[in-house]
């Protein structure tokens, strides 16, 4: 982290971007000191926002408000899982303080809580019981352990784990609950025979194809498509809420306008791509379900690679790839009546990030903070190298 970054003036350093001054003020205080509560709140809120690569506690607070506005149970499950995750990361696994303070081991448990609370009732056709909360807690523990393991394995390839820990842990408990008899449903032979997996469009794509009419296939309601582009940001946490999605946008702008633009462009591309990879009626696209993987995929490229026109094109390609993967795996997951979660985003982003890491045309971020700072640091480093090269040329000429 550069000194200029740490010395960002006024409220910007405390509240905007990655709130570096706040981090610097809290890092020297022990977790069990009087400042420990503030430090705990800081890392928990950063964990909520890290789902979309945002490392800012105020952003996390805004997103958490959005989750409670969308559904109190979803907000409560998010808090429940992230608190469990903190104790697992700090007490059980003793992960590095830097990771915990930034909320990195906590964002997958955030998704475990919000997604399970949002999707359990529509997918299992039964209310959330205390046993389901127990499953959520277990998945939160699993996700932190998987995060620690995957981070270590992928570090040698300079790749992040993204939300793979959430995908693995939540798939395990969904399949486990299905095996335990929750939401028992008739056996089906093909994806088109599947019953509706949800009464809401959240994580849809499993509708009965026999209900589609020719008029539905050609009629697109473009106002709803535009709404779906916005809702894709809230669907990252599996909630369909305009208020939550708007708060996500504000929270991301507070951290990085560049990242916000890349994510929402990715969400728009995913939503539009849904019109050519799925059949009408396009309820899932209108609800933002086809956009959330593209939303994450667009941001992933801009966050881990220094921004440039070439990287922006790559972000678009990544959003397209994630959406096509989503279309391909929906029937496969549908056979087990599972949502696709964020598997498409993870697969697409890992492949493309690995591809650019071997190319000299792209510049990987060594120490992620926020895209604007990555761009500034890269410019400063390039200028320093250029000046050093000119000095060496001048010295060589004088010697000659």
Image (cartoon, rainbow, N blue to C red):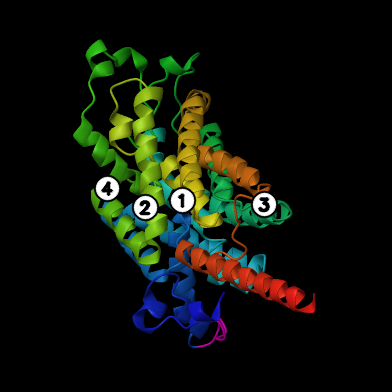
Given this view, does label 1 or label 3 mark the residue nearer the observer?
A: 1
Residue ID for mark 3: 150
Choose the circle earlier in sequence order: 2 or 4.
Answer: 4
Given this view, does label 2 or label 3 mark the residue nearer the observer?
A: 2
Residue 287 in the figure: left or right of residue 358: left
Choose the circle earlier in sequence order: 4 or 1.
Answer: 4
Residue 3 in the figure: left or right of residue 114: right
Label 4: element kind: loop
Point out residue 239 in the picture as x, y percentages from the top left corner.
34, 46
Label 3: element kind: helix
**Label 3 vs label 4: CA separation?**
32 Å
Choose the circle earlier in sequence order: 1 or 3.
Answer: 3
**Label 1 vs label 3: CA separation?**
21 Å
Given this view, does label 2 or label 4 mark the residue nearer the observer?
A: 2
Which portion, as a residue range, is magenta? 27-33
**Label 4 vs label 1: CA separation?**
21 Å
Residue ID for mark 2: 261
**Label 1 vs label 2: CA separation?**
8 Å
The total number of labels drawn is 4
Residue ID for mark 4: 241
């Amino acid at each position: 982290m550069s000194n200029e970054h740490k010395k960002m003036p006024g409220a910007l350093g405390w509240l905007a971007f990655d709130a570096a001054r706040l981090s610097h003020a809290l890092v020297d205080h022990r977790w069990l000191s009087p400042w420990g509560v503030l430090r705990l709140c800081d890392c928990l809120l950063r964990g909520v926002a890290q789902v979309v690569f945002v490392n800012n506690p105020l952003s996390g607070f805004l997103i958490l408000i959005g989750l409670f506005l969308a559904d109190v149970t979803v907000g409560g499950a998010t808090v429940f899982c992230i608190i469990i995750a903190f104790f697992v990361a700090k007490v059980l696994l003793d992960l590095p303080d830097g990771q915990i303070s930034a909320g990195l081991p906590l964002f997958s448990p955030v998704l475990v809580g919000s997604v399970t609370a949002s999707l359990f009732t529509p997918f299992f056709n039964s209310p959330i019981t205390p046993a389901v909360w127990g499953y959520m807690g277990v998945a939160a523990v699993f996700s932190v352990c998987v995060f620690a393991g995957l981070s270590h394995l992928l570090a040698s390839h300079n790749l992040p784990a993204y939300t793979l820990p959430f995908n693995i842990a939540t798939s395990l408990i969904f399949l486990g609950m299905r095996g335990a008899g929750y939401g028992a449903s008739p056996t089906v032979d093909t994806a088109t025979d599947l019953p509706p997996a949800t009464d809401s469009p959240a994580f849809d794509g499993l509708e009965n194809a026999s209900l589609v009419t020719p008029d539905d296939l050609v009629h697109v309601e473009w106002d709803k498509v535009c709404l779906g582009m916005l809702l894709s940001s809230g669907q990252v946490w599996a909630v369909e809420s305009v208020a939550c999605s708007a708060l996500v946008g504000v929270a991301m702008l507070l951290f990085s306008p560049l990242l916000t633009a890349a994510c929402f462009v990715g969400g728009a591309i995913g939503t539009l791509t849904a019109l050519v990879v799925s059949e009408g009626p396009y309820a899932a696209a209108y609800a933002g379900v086809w956009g959330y993987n593209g939303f994450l995929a667009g941001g992933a490229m801009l966050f881990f690679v220094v921004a440039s026109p070439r990287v922006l094109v790559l972000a678009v390609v990544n959003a397209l790839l994630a959406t096509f993967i989503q279309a391909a795996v929906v029937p496969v997951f549908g056979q087990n009546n599972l949502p696709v979660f964020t598997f498409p985003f993870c697969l697409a982003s890992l492949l493309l990030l690995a591809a650019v890491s071997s190319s000299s045309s792209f510049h990987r971020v060594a120490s992620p903070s926020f895209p604007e700072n990555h761009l500034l640091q890269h410019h400063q480093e390039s200028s320093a190298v250029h000046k050093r090269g000119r000095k060496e040329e001048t010295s060589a000429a004088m010697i000659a």
